[in-house]
Image (cartoon, rainbow, N blue to C red):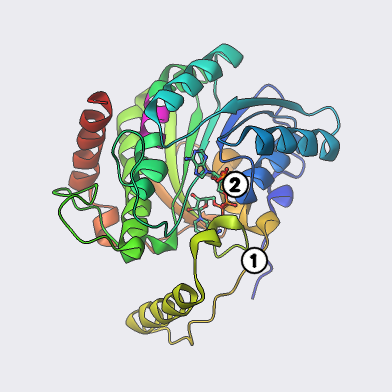
């Protein structure tokens, strides 16, 4: 097996000075590692997160890890569109140009709950909040004349599709696995449609599966959830004709962040977009419903409508 690259190795030798990179969920896991790698290469990192203490701690850690790093912090709670809108305005004040928007923040397998605007928590945090943030930052992204939007999705998108009749679980019994899958499917559909709609403004968009990474994302998982997940991995391996015992092969955040950093800066992706990326490469492991152009357009219109109404 080829050795996985780390996020630091991806930026090795690159000069990103003068580039502004906004990262949501920068206070932990993959977002924090992406921030470190991009700052190492000289980028101005705009770190957004919801917990002010964790954000301040992250800024301190980055300053210690990368002396001279240019770091800005922005409070952002994706479960409140009012916070998303305030964050977009703050980012606009910090930088008139955004070269990279990494929509990285996320929650997984949360118990049923609603955001302040009434969205189901997983799709509200992982998709609708990021949809609105991206929409509001289009002027700054267009100003880069070559910007990239990187949506953190997951191989777990195969667990669920977006239900256009009931995106916020008002009519069905809640299933936290399907709800996570739907939110990660939405991340892919959003990236594909953003690329189609925004490429003429020089904005390209990607969806990323980072691998299985040991981070705080599993904080809502019980022992039995882990065992259910292993069964699911085994079943999906069997369906692909790749038998597995369902063993979860965890990697570190340093390596897990490599693909999203690669998506953000790799010259190999110049003039390309609407791609699903994995292991620092283009992957075709996307469920058909997650790459359906018509559904991507439908989700865009639904997201515009639901966000505008709140
Ligand atoms: N780790 C994996 O194996 C894996 C696999 C596939 C995909 N992913 C995706 O990778 C992304 C990053 O996950 P991670 O593994 O780095 O998890 P993590 O360590 O839990 O980091 C998630 C980040 O998102 C933030 N966040 C959560 N809810 C938020 C909200 N309402 N507003 C603003 N920020 C919020 C968290 O802040 P708090 O700490 O304050 O909650 C944290 O900074 C997620 O989108 C996830 O779905 C991860």
Q: Is residue 87 left or right of residue 189?
A: right
> Which is nearer the N-term, disc 1 or disc 2?
1
Q: Is residue 97 left or right of residue 129?
A: right
The residue under label 1 is: 251
The quadrant the C terminus occupies is: top left
Quadrant of the rendered image containing residue 242 = bottom left
Q: Is residue 167 magenta?
A: no
Give the image location of residue 260, x and y in percent.
Answer: 56, 47
Residue 111 appears in the rendering:
yes
Quadrant of the rendered image containing residue 248 = bottom right
Give the image location of residue 188, x and y in percent.
Answer: 36, 49
Mark 2, Cα crowd under 10 Å, few <14 / some 14-19 / many 20+, is many
Mark 1, Cα crowd under 10 Å, few <14 / some 14-19 / many 20+, is some
Give the image location of residue 38, x and y in percent.
Answer: 69, 37
**What secondary structure predominates along the stretch shown in magenta?**
helix
Tally of marks: 2
Residue at left offset 36%, top offset 82%? 235
Which SS class for mark 1?
A: loop
Ligand 1 within 8 Å of disc 1? The answer is no
Ligand 1 within 8 Å of disc 2? The answer is no
Residue at left offset 42%, top offset 60%? 109
Against 196, residue 221 (above or below) is: below
Against 293, residue 200 (above or below) is: above
Against 232, residue 52 (above or below) is: above
Mark number, residue 262: 2
Q: Is residue 59 left or right of residue 302?
A: right
Residue at left offset 50%, top offset 28%? 147
- Tell me which segment is drawn in magenta: 130-135
Against 73, residue 184 (above or below) is: below
Give the image location of residue 94, x and y in percent.
Answer: 60, 15
């Amino acid at each position: 097996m080829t050795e996985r690259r780390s996020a630091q190795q991806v930026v090795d030798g690159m000069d990103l000075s003068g580039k502004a990179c906004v990262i949501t969920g920068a206070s932990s896991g993959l977002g924090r590692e992406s921030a470190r790698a991009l700052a190492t290469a000289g980028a101005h990192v705009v770190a957004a997160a919801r917990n002010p203490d964790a954000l301040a701690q992250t800024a301190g850690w980055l300053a210690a890890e990368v002396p001279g790093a240019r770091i800005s912090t922005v409070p952002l709670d994706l479960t409140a569109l009012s916070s998303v809108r305030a964050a977009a305005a703050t980012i606009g004040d910090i930088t008139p140009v955004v070269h990279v928007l990494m929509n990285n923040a996320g929650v997984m397998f949360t118990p049923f709950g609603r955001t302040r605007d009434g969205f189901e928590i997983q799709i509200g945090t992982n998709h609708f909040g990021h949809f609105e943030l991206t929409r509001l930052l289009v002027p700054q992204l267009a100003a880069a004349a070559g910007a990239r939007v990187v949506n953190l999705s997951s191989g777990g998108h195969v667990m669920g599709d977006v239900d256009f009749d009931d995106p916020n679980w008002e009519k069905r019994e809640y299933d936290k696995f399907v709800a996570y899958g739907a939110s990660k499917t939405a991340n892919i559909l959003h990236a594909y449609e953003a690329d189609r709609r925004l490429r003429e403004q020089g904005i390209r968009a990607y969806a990323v599966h980072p691998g299985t990474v040991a981070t705080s994302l599993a904080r809502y998982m019980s022992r039995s959830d882990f065992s259910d997940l292993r069964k699911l991995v085994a079943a999906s391996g069997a369906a692909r004709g790749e038998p597995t015992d369902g063993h979860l092969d965890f990697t570190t955040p340093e390596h897990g962040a490599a693909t999203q950093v690669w998506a953000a800066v790799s010259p190999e992706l110049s003039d390309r977009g609407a791609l699903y990326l994995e292991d620092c490469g283009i992957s075709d492991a996307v469920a058909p419903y997650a790459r359906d152009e018509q559904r991507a357009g439908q989700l865009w219109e639904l997201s515009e409508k639901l966000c505008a109404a709140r």
